[in-house]
Image (cartoon, rainbow, N blue to C red):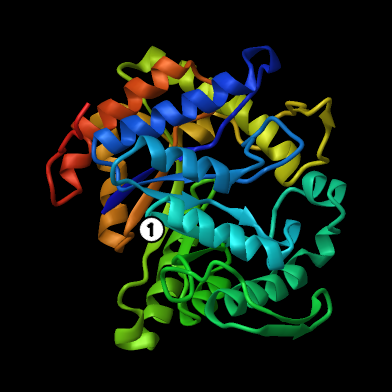
């Protein structure tokens, strides 16, 4: 099983400065590369300080310039917010600038506030995403593409430069519904999912759906991977664990506001609302614990056959604490699940 560090760019205090937030994320990427993580992942969100990243492809290029080998996942880019006729070219250029380390995770968008402020009604997001994905794949794989759909109508065009890799970078689909996971796997996509609150039966159903789709593809689908996303942090004792759980609880009050709640955002700041999960609930579902407890909690994931676990270390804690947690996870947890020992890259 491989591991990915999510660079979720949480920005609860505007006085901290966006430049410092992104430097923190870059520091995490460099450290993850140094200590053997398989990948880092980048969100895309606009107009708010939660999961704040309005230019994920730009940041992917920045990360590639400061790291040696780590994969760079978008988790996810929101296709309905972009024009595929120009976005396809941006994807190709980013794939070139990242030396082929880009994996393009795509999705339809989940925050109503964000989507509708940018002119995309939530009830249209799935339909817009489906057509955008078809257009993107066509532009990345063929020349002289024309289109006559509901949202795209254009005469023949050829994206330049042409992709270095046939069809462009590998694509990963963000999807939670088991039925959706099955169908996306059957279409040849890598899958990223999460049970969110930690519902174990949902997780099992998600894994089974992926395995079913992969099996039905036969040898063609053997390269496909399943990535699971979780909030995580290392705590050395009970008091520290409680403090970090309370920080996560406050974070989820903001996250729930824009994910399933009313979407109250003032001057770019997401208003914290009472979280739907208690601190006690989060202590069971999140991976905020000692390294030995972390090993025990991750054990079932490898037994289920999950290929990669993405860990979100960013939920309002100090930057130094997060760097310490990434290093400690790499040194004390990862060796129990990876086939290779940690090899630090040159300073």
Left or right of 139: which side holds 40? left
Give residue 180's position: percent from left, percent from top: 57, 73
Q: What number of labels is visible?
A: 1
Left or right of 65: which side holds 124? right
Which secondary structure, mark 1? loop
Q: In this rendering, is residue 55 above or below 209?
A: above
Residue 19 picture quarter: top right
Q: Quadrant of the C terminus?
A: top left
- Residue at image coords 33%, 60%: 306
Q: Is residue 105 visible?
A: no
Residue 66 picture quarter: top left
Pick the residue in front: 121 or 289.
121
Q: In this rendering, is residue 270 above or below 199?
A: above
Give residue 272's position: percent from left, percent from top: 73, 26
Q: In this rendering, is residue 314 above or below 117?
A: above
Pick the residue in front: 137 or 310.
137
Give residue 123's position: percent from left, percent from top: 83, 64
Write down the residue under mark 1.
100
Farthest front residue?
Answer: 161
Pick the residue in front: 63 or 104.
63
Q: Is residue 50 visible?
A: yes
Disc 1 crowd, CA 10 A, few/some/many (<14, 14-19, 20+): some
- Residue at image coords 60%, 57%: 90
Give residue 184's position: percent from left, percent from top: 53, 75
- Residue at image coords 56%, 23%: 21
Q: Quadrant of the N terminus?
A: bottom left
């Amino acid at each position: 099983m491989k591991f990915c560090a999510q660079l979720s760019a949480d920005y609860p205090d505007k006085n901290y400065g966006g430049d410092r937030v992104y430097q923190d994320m870059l520091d995490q990427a460099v450290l993850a590369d140094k200590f053997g993580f398989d990948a880092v992942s980048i969100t895309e969100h606009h107009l708010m300080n939660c999961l704040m990243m309005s230019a994920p492809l730009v940041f992917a290029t920045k990360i590639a310039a400061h790291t040696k080998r780590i994969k760079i996942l978008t988790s996810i880019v929101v296709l309905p917010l972009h024009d595929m006729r120009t976005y396809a070219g941006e994807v190709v250029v980013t794939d070139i600038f990242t030396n082929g380390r880009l994996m393009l995770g795509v999705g339809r968008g989940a925050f109503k506030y964000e989507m509708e402020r940018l002119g995309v009604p939530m009830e249209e997001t799935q339909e817009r995403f489906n057509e955008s994905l078809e257009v993107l794949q066509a532009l990345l794989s063929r020349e002289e593409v024309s289109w006559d759909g509901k949202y795209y109508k254009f005469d023949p065009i050829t994206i330049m430069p042409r992709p270095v890799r046939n069809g462009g970078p590998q694509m990963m689909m963000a999807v939670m519904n088991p039925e959706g996971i099955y169908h996306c796997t059957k279409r040849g996509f890598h899958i990223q999912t999460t049970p969110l609150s930690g519902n174990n039966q949902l997780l099992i159903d998600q894994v089974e759906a992926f395995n079913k789709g992969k099996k039905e593809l036969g040898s063609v689908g053997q390269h496909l991977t399943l990535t699971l996303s979780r909030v995580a942090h290392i705590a050395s004792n009970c008091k520290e664990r409680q403090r970090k759980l309370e920080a996560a609880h406050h974070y989820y009050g903001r996250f729930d506001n824009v994910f399933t709640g009313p979407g109250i955002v003032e001057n770019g700041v997401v208003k914290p609302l009472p979280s739907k999960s208690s601190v006690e609930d989060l202590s069971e579902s999140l991976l905020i614990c000692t390294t030995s407890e972390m090993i025990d909690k991750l054990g079932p994931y490898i037994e289920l056959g999950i290929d990669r676990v993405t860990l979100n270390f960013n939920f309002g804690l100090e930057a130094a604490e997060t760097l310490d947690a990434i290093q400690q996870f790499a040194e004390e947890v990862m060796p129990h699940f990876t086939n290779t020992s940690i090899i630090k890259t040159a300073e």
